């Protein structure tokens, strides 16, 4: 039987960043793929900022070998701050401080073996503890129309409680790269979820609504992940554990209407760079002209 959950606040967010990023070799040989930049900000920073805007207080990173620079990125750099202050670079100081989590508000743990996304999330169980948490997959960089995707999920959560995942339409030929859902009736600003499948073959996909990498989950997911069998790709999949959780607790979908760039793929990463550069006052006009010249239009 499905039970409702108390609406406890969502204070912590988990960022799985252990992936090897082989699609970005040789760039990702010594630099984690999450540190590649979209314009001038590392990919990981977009997800962290989205979480902070949604009210997240504590940022939990599940890292792996060769990912230490992510920890450095979210640390204070006194020498740099001192140098910028002595040169009166207040604009740069502001950029640094607004991207800086407060002391004591980050945690880092390691996924020791690449056993899948579900396993990576499970590695955060002790740090998250017995409370609901947000999960953000940093490869998915989002440009919202108004508020960020996680802020919208939080609003739905405030109505519904339970578990919520964001979904959006994708090109039907791309479904085999994602988790795919079947949405049911509208409820509390979200939709009931009538089915979920991880990386289906194009011909078996129940819809083209893909799970876009933003989740609010109840801590009971950790118990399920503990004994989750391997699924698609021979990996422990969070989607498979969510399917089991949905049999026990309320589970909703929310349809995100902004733009999502899958920066785990070269095309998505390039598209994100062009799109964000075009939007910005400092880079937009020049990039627009350059792109038009390149395309001969
Ligand atoms: C993961 C999830 C999948 C989701 C996707 C979004 O897959 O398992 O359900 O649609 O992220 O990026 P991965 O990209 O880790 O293969």
Image (cartoon, grey):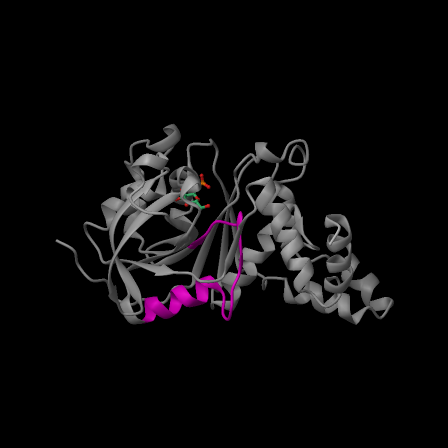
Q: Residue at x 49, y 65 (%)?
A: 148
Res 233 → quadrant: top left
Relative depth, front residue between 158 and 259:
259
Residue projecting furthest to the front? 297
Which quadrant is home to the C terminus?
bottom right
| Residue 14 at x, y percent in the picture | 46, 52
Between 282 and 120, the one lying in front of the other is 282
Bounds of the magenta segment: 135-158
- Above or below for 150 versus 241: below
Q: Is residue 275 left or right of residue 120?
A: right
- Residue 200 visible, this orientation: no
Horizontally, is 159 left or right of 53 in the view? left
Front residue (pair 226, 181) = 181
| 7 to the left or right of 120 | left
124 or 294: which is nearer to us? 294
What x and y, as percent, mark residue 38? Answer: 65, 52
Residue 116 found in image quarter: top left
Membership of 296 in magenta stretch: no
Residue 80, position as x, y percentages in the image: 78, 58
Picture quadrant of ligand 1 = top left
**Whole-percent x and y of residue 159?**
30, 71
Report the residue that reaches farthest toward the top.
Answer: 234
């Amino acid at each position: 039987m499905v039970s409702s959950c108390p609406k406890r606040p969502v204070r912590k967010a988990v960022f799985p960043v252990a992936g090897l990023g082989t699609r970005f070799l040789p760039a990702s040989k010594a630099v984690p793929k999450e540190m590649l930049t979209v314009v001038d900000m590392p990919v990981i920073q977009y997800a962290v900022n989205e979480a902070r805007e949604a009210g997240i207080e504590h940022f939990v990173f599940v890292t792996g070998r060769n990912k230490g620079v992510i920890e450095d990125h979210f640390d204070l750099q006194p020498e740099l701050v001192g140098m910028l202050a002595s040169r009166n670079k207040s604009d740069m100081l502001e950029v640094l401080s607004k991207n800086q989590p407060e002391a004591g508000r980050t945690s880092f743990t390691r996924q020791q073996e690449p056993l899948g996304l579900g396993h990576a999330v499970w590695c955060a169980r002790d740090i998250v503890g017995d409370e609901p948490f947000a999960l953000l997959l940093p490869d998915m960089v989002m440009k919202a129309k108004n508020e960020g995707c996680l802020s919208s999920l939080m609003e739905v959560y405030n109505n519904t409680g339970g578990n919520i995942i964001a979904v959006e339409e994708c090109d039907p030929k791309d479904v085999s790269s994602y988790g795919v859902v079947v949405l049911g009736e509208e409820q509390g600003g979200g939709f009931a979820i009538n089915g979920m499948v991880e990386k289906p073959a194009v011909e078996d996909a129940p819809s083209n609504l893909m799970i876009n990498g933003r989740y609010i989950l109840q801590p009971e997911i950790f118990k399920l992940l503990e004994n989750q069998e391997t699924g698609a790709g021979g990996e422990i999949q969070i989607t498979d554990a969510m399917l089991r959780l949905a049999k026990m607790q309320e589970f909703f979908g929310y349809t995100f209407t902004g733009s999502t760039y899958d920066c785990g793929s070269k095309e998505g990463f390039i598209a994100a760079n062009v799109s964000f550069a075009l939007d910005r006052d400092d880079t937009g006009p020049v990039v627009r002209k350059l792109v038009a010249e390149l395309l001969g239009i």
